[in-house]
Image: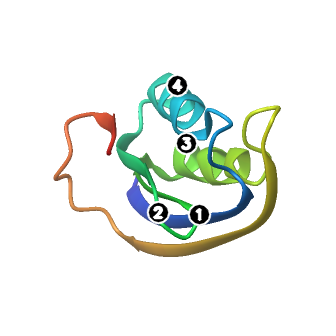
Amino acid sequence: MAEVRAHVLISGVVQGVNFRYWTHHEANRRGITGWVRNLPDGRVEALFEGPRTAVEEMVAWCHRGPRSAQVTDVKVRWEAATGEFDEFTVRY
């Protein structure tokens, strides 16, 4: 199956609600590599790389997020996979 990369920006109440923790958990569960981090403007940014179906599921999850999040917008830029990551990490 073809590997893809999705660069995602999530807006809403997405900081202070364990969004990064749950993103890390969900990405690992799906075997996705990449990273997630908080941005100074209150959004969460993530880069997902892996099989197309798994990455599409992860992007769909971002529209909901963890139970305490209130996602208002998700912007996705699809890119070619590079294979540069060995795991999924939380960036600080």
Q: Are marks 2 and 3 in contact (CB under 8 Å)?
A: no
Task: Tell me the amino acid under the disc marked 2.
Answer: Leu
12 vs 51: above or below: below
Task: Tell me the amino acid under the disc marked 3.
Answer: Ala
Mark pair 3, 1: CA separation: 23 Å
Mark pair 4, 1: CA separation: 19 Å
| Mark 2 lies on residue | 39
Residue 12: percent from the left, percent from the top?
Answer: 75, 61
The dot on residue 43 is: 1
Task: Tell me the amino acid under the disc marked 1.
Answer: Arg
Residue 77: percent from the left, percent from the top?
Answer: 51, 76
| Mark 3 lies on residue | 54
SS under mark 3: helix
Mark pair 2, 3: CA separation: 24 Å
Color style of the picture: rainbow
Residue 9: percent from the left, percent from the top?
Answer: 56, 67
The dot on residue 30 is: none
SS under mark 2: loop
| Mark 4 lies on residue | 25
Mark pair 1, 2: CA separation: 5 Å
SS under mark 1: loop
Q: What residue is at 34 percent from the left and 36 percent from the top?
A: 88
Of the two numbered discs 2 and 3 on the same chain, state the one appearing first in sequence.
Answer: 2
Task: Tell me the amino acid under the disc marked 4.
Answer: His
SS under mark 4: helix
Of the two numbered discs 4 and 3 on the same chain, state the one appearing first in sequence.
Answer: 4
- Give the quadrant of the C terminus: top left
Of the two numbered discs 3 and 1 on the same chain, state the one appearing first in sequence.
Answer: 1
Q: What residue is at 44 percent from the left and 26 percent from the top?
A: 28
Q: Nearer the viewer, residue 23 or 13?
A: 13
